[in-house]
Image (spheres, helix red, strand yellow):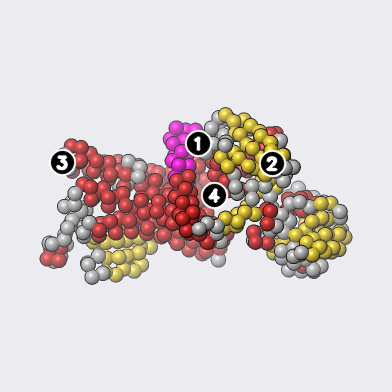
């Protein structure tokens, strides 16, 4: 079932971002009265197709890994018997250089506008996000050596303000591959502190970890009960979803990590739990169960899973973000710009070698991430749609023949020289473009396989 859900999520994700991209080409071509012969999402055998009253065929292919808009005169012969229907139609070749450039650029532009709309929508409906409190600092990590500790609140990183925990990862992502210092301002017991963390070619390899984890930082997860195991000690003795565990045997519990550590040391023991339920404080006695860990040590547990419903969390550990119409629109453009700059910087670092190209992901990784994002809820899934839409827009703007950027380059050359680029030059450039794109796809696919094994 999980595999089917992942496949469906992947198809939906790719169909949205590719469909919007091709829709940009399509609508712009229609705006300039260029006749469109076919609008297709996916490749391979057609699952279904239909034709409109303007003789444009719409179809969906069995492999949702791309798509195209086929315009009259764009590398397609006129079929016998169709000359009469098409003789008065404007072809792509009859369009001016400016019109062709607009049609070509409209695909990537549509992807950026999709990202703007997604971030605008999320800002309008409002989101609940993790606060920038630290719940765990890994032993002997860069963060621990710098003095950051549990329950500290991150305020700034490299002079950039931090409002939610995700900001930490976004800002730190700009430092991947760098050498120097990461400057962090944080709050410790209501006192502002500043620290500088030395880095040397930081995260330049292919380690698939978040930047915050690489520093040794984990978000603060309060000890709020999510799901209860059937017939587990917590369920049997009366714990409920949403309960906030405050202490065990008199030991204060501040985070979920604290709870896990304390319980692990109490296998098969009668324990006293103080918890907060709604506005009431309760005390419950229960007998823990146990399990054997990977090292063969008996550990205690009570059969609960941490709550991922941020609405159940104490309000000081979450951040509510909701904007009015104009502020949300501004957020849409700002977030799209921030992630665009981040991706461009990452591409530049890959080209320069300061970041390993092994970080490049292909369809397998995207499908796994799509499934995980869909399970996490619509906010996470839509955020991934926006991020991948920006990626697709930027990828297509690369000056590689066969991509939109390559076509724009050819149109620019045509404009400068005053005549169309020769057929031989176009043919060889397309061959080079196909080799480059196919090589990139194979490399990304190999990276995906390497991660699986």
Q: Residues within 10 Å of mark 2 (few under 14, many from 20)?
A: some
The percent position of residue 376, horizontal first and vertical second, equals 57, 59
Sequence-first tag of 3 and 2: 2
Give the number of the mark in front: 2 or 1.
2
For residue 116, side relative to residue 420 (left or right): right
Q: Which label sits in the foreground, 3 or 4?
A: 3
Residue 393's spot in the image, x, y percent? 38, 49
Assign a secondary structure to mark 1.
loop
Q: Nearer the viewer, mark 4 or mark 1?
A: 1
Q: Which residue is painted at 29% across and 59% down in the image?
A: 27
Disc 4 to disc 1, C-alpha distance: 21 Å
Residue position for label 3: 419
Which residue bears the numbered disc 1?
Answer: 355
CA separation in Å, label 1 and label 3:
41 Å
The residue carrying mark 2 is 187
Q: Secondary structure of the magenta portion, mostly?
A: helix
Q: Which mark is residue 452?
A: 4
Magenta span of residues: 339-357
Which SS class for mark 4?
helix
Whether residue 443 is visible: yes
């Amino acid at each position: 079932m999980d595999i089917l859900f992942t496949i469906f999520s992947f198809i939906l994700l790719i169909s949205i971002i590719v469909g919007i991209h091709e829709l940009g080409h399509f609508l712009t071509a229609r705006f300039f009265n260029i006749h469109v012969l076919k609008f297709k999402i996916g490749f391979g055998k057609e699952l279904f197709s239909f034709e409109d009253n303007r003789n444009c065929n719409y179809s969906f292919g069995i492999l949702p890994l791309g798509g195209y808009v086929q315009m009259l005169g764009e590398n397609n012969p006129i079929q016998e018997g169709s000359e009469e229907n098409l003789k008065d139609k404007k072809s792509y070749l009859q369009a001016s250089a400016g019109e062709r450039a607009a049609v070509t650029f409209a695909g990537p532009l549509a992807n950026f506008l999709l990202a703007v709309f997604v971030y605008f929508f999320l800002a309008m409906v409002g989101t609940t996000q993790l606060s920038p409190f630290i719940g765990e600092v890994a032993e002997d990590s860069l963060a621990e050596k710098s003095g950051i500790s549990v329950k500290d609140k991150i305020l700034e990183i490299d002079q950039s303000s931090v409002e939610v925990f995700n900001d930490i990862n976004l800002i730190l992502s700009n430092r991947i591959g760098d050498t120097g210092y990461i400057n962090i301002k944080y709050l410790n017991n209501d006192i502002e502190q500043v620290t500088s963390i030395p880095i040397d070619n930081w995260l330049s390899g292919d380690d698939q970890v978040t930047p915050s984890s690489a520093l040794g930082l984990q978000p603060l997860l309060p000890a709020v009960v999510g799901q209860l195991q059937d017939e587990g000690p917590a369920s049997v003795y009366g714990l409920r979803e949403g309960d906030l565990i405050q202490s065990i045997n008199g030991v204060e519990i501040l985070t979920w990590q604290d709870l896990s550590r304390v319980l692990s040391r109490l296998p098969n023991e009668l324990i006293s739990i103080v918890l907060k339920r709604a506005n009431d404080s309760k005390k419950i006695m229960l007998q823990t169960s146990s399990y054997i860990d990977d090292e063969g040590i008996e550990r205690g547990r009570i059969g609960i899973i941490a709550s991922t419903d941020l609405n159940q969390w104490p309000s000081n550990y979450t951040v509510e973000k909701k904007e009015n119409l104009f502020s949300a629109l501004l957020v849409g453009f700002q977030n799209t710009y921030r992630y665009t700059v981040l991706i461009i910087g990452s591409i530049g670092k890959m080209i320069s070698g300061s970041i390993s190209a092994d970080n490049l992901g292909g369809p397998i990784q995207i499908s796994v991430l799509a499934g995980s994002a869909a399970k996490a809820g619509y906010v996470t899934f839509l955020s991934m749609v926006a991020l991948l839409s920006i990626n697709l827009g930027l990828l297509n703007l690369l000056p590689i023949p066969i991509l939109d950027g390559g076509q724009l380059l050819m149109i620019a050359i045509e404009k400068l020289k005053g005549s169309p680029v020769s057929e031989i030059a176009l043919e060889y450039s397309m061959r080079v473009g196909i080799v480059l794109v196919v090589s990139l796809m194979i490399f990304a696919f190999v990276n995906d396989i390497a991660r699986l094994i």
